[in-house]
Image: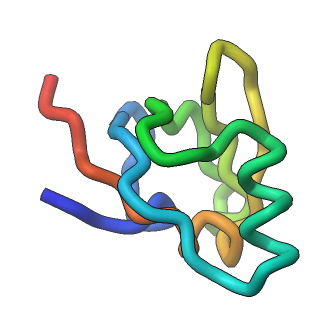
Amino acid sequence: MQKTLDKFIVGESGVVVKVEGERKLKRRLYDMGITNGAEIYLRKKAPLGDPLEITVRSYELSLRKAEASCVTMEVKHV
């Protein structure tokens, strides 16, 4: 099942399938290690859903909900 990273619930993980958005945003996400095939785990969500704290490539990263909506994921079933 595929869904965007902003739709994940805490504790869910998956693999990046596609990164969309304008050129600057895509480049920024790629520079942070969010590339096709990268595994991402959603650690925390702020009370209003923004920002999200994820683990990618063994480090923690905070993303805005708008940035996370550009990342399409394949949900990993545990």
- Would you place residue 53 above or below residue 47 in this image? above
Left or right of 25, for residue 2: left
Left or right of 53, for residue 40: left
> How many numbered marks have been drawn onto this rendered protein structure?
0
The quadrant holding residue 56 is top right
The quadrant holding residue 54 is top right
The quadrant holding residue 24 is bottom right
Q: Position of residue 21 (x, y in %)?
A: 65, 82
Left or right of 71, for residue 61: right
Colouring convention used in this rendered image of the protein: rainbow
Residue at 63%, 45% in the rendered image: 34
- For this rendering, which residue is in front, 3 or 25? 25
Residue at 42%, 48% in the rendered image: 16
Residue at 49%, 34% in the rendered image: 38
Quarter containing the N terminus? bottom left
Residue that sits furthest to the bottom in the current view: 22
- Would you place residue 30 above or below residue 69 in this image? above
Left or right of 70, for residue 72: left
Residue at 74%, 55% in the rendered image: 29
Q: Position of residue 2 (x, y in %)?
A: 22, 62
Residue that sits furthest to the top in the current view: 58
Quarter containing the C terminus? top left
- For this rendering, which residue is in front, 19 or 48? 19
